[in-house]
Amino acid sequence: MIEKIKFLRITGPKEDISRVIEQYLNKYKLHVENALSELSDVHNLVPYVDTYNVRETLLKSQDAIEELKKSDAHKVCKDVIEQKMTVEEASNCMSTMHLLLDDLNSQKKERLDQIQELKERKEKIMPFMRIDVPLAELFQYKFIKCEFGRIALEYYEKLMKYVYHDMNTLFLECMMKQGFVYGVYFVPSTRQTKEDAFFSSLHFEEITFPEDMSDTPAKIIQDIDKKIEVLNAEIDDLTSKMLEVLTKHAVRFIHAYEVLKEYNDDAEIRKLAACTKQKDEVYYILCGWMSEEDTKKFRKEIESDQLISCYVDDTTDSTSSTPPTKLKNPKIFKPFEMFIRMYGLPAYGEIDPTVFLAITYSFLFGMMYGDVGQGLCLVIGGYLLYHFKKQNLCAILSCAGVSSTIFGFLYGSVFGFEDVLKPIWVNPMKDTLTVLITAVGFGICLNIFAMILNIINGIREKNIERIFFDTNGVAGLVFYASVIGTALFLVTGHTIKAVFLVTIMIVVPLILIFFKEPLSRMIEKRKGLITGEKGMFFVENGFGMIEVLLSYVTNTISFVRVGAFALSHAGMMSVVLLLSHASSGHPNVIVLVLGNLFVAGLEGLIVGIQVLRLEYYEMFSRFYSGTGKEFKAKK
């Protein structure tokens, strides 16, 4: 069901809004609407502008506070009761913390940058570890020049295969990494220009080293590692000093951070508020929706609060915003709200189909998948998964398992064995026609009930067309019921005496459905009975009537699948029993268990999807729009 809600206008002094949010609105949930939009007819309204912008302060403080919360100081803070800070005091406190930490942070950042630079140097020299000569010596040769770099593997292979043996160059391969060959080539100084040009044509990427990297690559890397180790030690020392500063003022810093965080969290509510000025006082105005139950408690609690006023609209028609939907169902049906949200929440005032879906889904699932043993496994497995994982789908699976177990007794099926229990109702494989006819009959009942729900929704909306002339309104219900009743009489061998009356009950509803638009406009006294060209009206409605008739037939026949899946389960389990040689009296237990697991997994999944399809396409499409917006209390 949908919980009744009220539209509230809450007002008071601007500086008091944070107290109101913390003391009342976090307790009595309010779905906040934009006050400027709701009160567009009120003059002198301006948006609420926050006095303090604490977002940047929070972001800057987050790392330090998280580090402090990991320490023992945080445990001490939990036991310390301190007077509530104002937002201004909390902001000043955090500014003080930043001043104390800024210098240490700068030093820490400087060392982190140095470490990054050293790592980049190490990465550059690492591929040339094979060279055991100081770099300074290599670059001082007078008659031989060398170039460090890398070349793509494909070009290196071509160089070695076709050109290298004719060159006056020595290429020393050092390392192969990520599709590149790192190395150094030596060339006589007299041919350097020519050879450099040739290597450049092979996309040789030159790698240069800073002047202070003059030792051997191995020694350079060793020195870099030592420097990084020293810098990391300095960073640890700075971190300890920062933590020491934080710990000294831990209570105030954490308290201030929590105050600012709470203020920032409430910003979502404040930004939807409006402000108005009366005399020298500025007042805030908050607009939103609250459940009827919470509204009563809220109004009672603020009776003695002189700084807050609340005005309640008893009707939802007085607002420009669409009332949100707040579902309130018994605990056993609550998991099925997941399927409702997948389709779309009901609009406020529309029938909530959660209970209808829960009952029909479980019933159809059991009828399509009736087995005592596998049903009990679904019940136990679904319950355990829901208990530990808290997933709604697991609870739905458990409910469906209960229905599956019940139908298992009706069918006399236990893990596929048909001779263990005597069927209370029928054996699907022996009474196929009974199962199929029952499935279609149940589908007809569901379609009729869905039409009744559609009529009720039409009455709630005061929609004449939906109540009387819709395909699923009174006209559609009379037509469908008349056709089904006539077919039932003929099939059972009875004669229809009042043929003229039956004809009227079939033909007249179709005429009403055909002319539903002009008839509705006429009753509502709207101008122009037919909108658009009359010729197109008859053509479109003519094809529309064909679609309507086909939908009645297909929606009814669609429920044959319910019985078909009951037969499918029996058929699949008979194959499992055959493969396990169950008829011999000594079945293969492994084959039997694996077969049951396979059938349970496959059929459970398919049946679950098929039942949901029946719910959405055959029933929901008749009465349910799902255009509601969810009730959300901003925090």
Image (tube, rainbow, N blue to C red):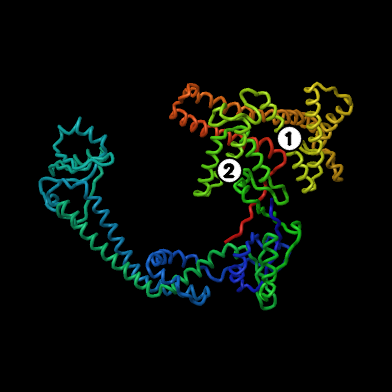
Please, is residue 597 above or below residue 131 in the view? above
Please, is residue 64 above or below residue 508 in the view? below
Mark 2 surroundings: few (<14), some (14-19) or many (≥20) residues within 10 A: many
Q: Residue at x 85, y 45 (%)?
A: 524
Q: Position of residue 393 (x, y in %)?
A: 55, 44
Instruction: State the image quarter where residue 494 is shown.
Output: top right
Does the CB distance between marks 2 and 1 fall below 8 Å? no
Instruction: State the image quarter where residue 103 is shown.
Output: bottom left
Give 381 or 159, whichever is nearer the viewer.
Answer: 381
Q: Residue at x 68, y 45 (%)?
A: 353
Q: Position of residue 125 (x, y in %)?
A: 21, 50
Mark 1 surroundings: few (<14), some (14-19) or many (≥20) residues within 10 A: few
| Quarter occupied by the C terminus | bottom right
- Residue identifier under label 1: 445
Secondary element under disc 2, as helix, strand or loop, is helix
Q: Residue at x 22, y 60 (%)?
A: 227
In the picture, measured across the screen, residue 329 lies left or right of residue 86, that is: right
Give 566 or 409, whichever is nearer the viewer.
Answer: 409
Label 2 or label 1, whichever comes before in sequence order:
2
Report the amino acid beneath label 2. Answer: Ile
Q: Which mark is residue 396?
A: 2
Q: CA distance from mark 2 to mark 1?
A: 23 Å
Q: Position of residue 427 (x, y in %)?
A: 62, 26
In the picture, measured across the screen, residue 369 lies left or right of residue 497, that is: left
Instruction: State the image quarter where residue 422 is shown.
Output: top right
Give 551 or 169, whichever is nearer the viewer.
Answer: 551
Q: Position of residue 529 (x, y in %)?
A: 85, 39
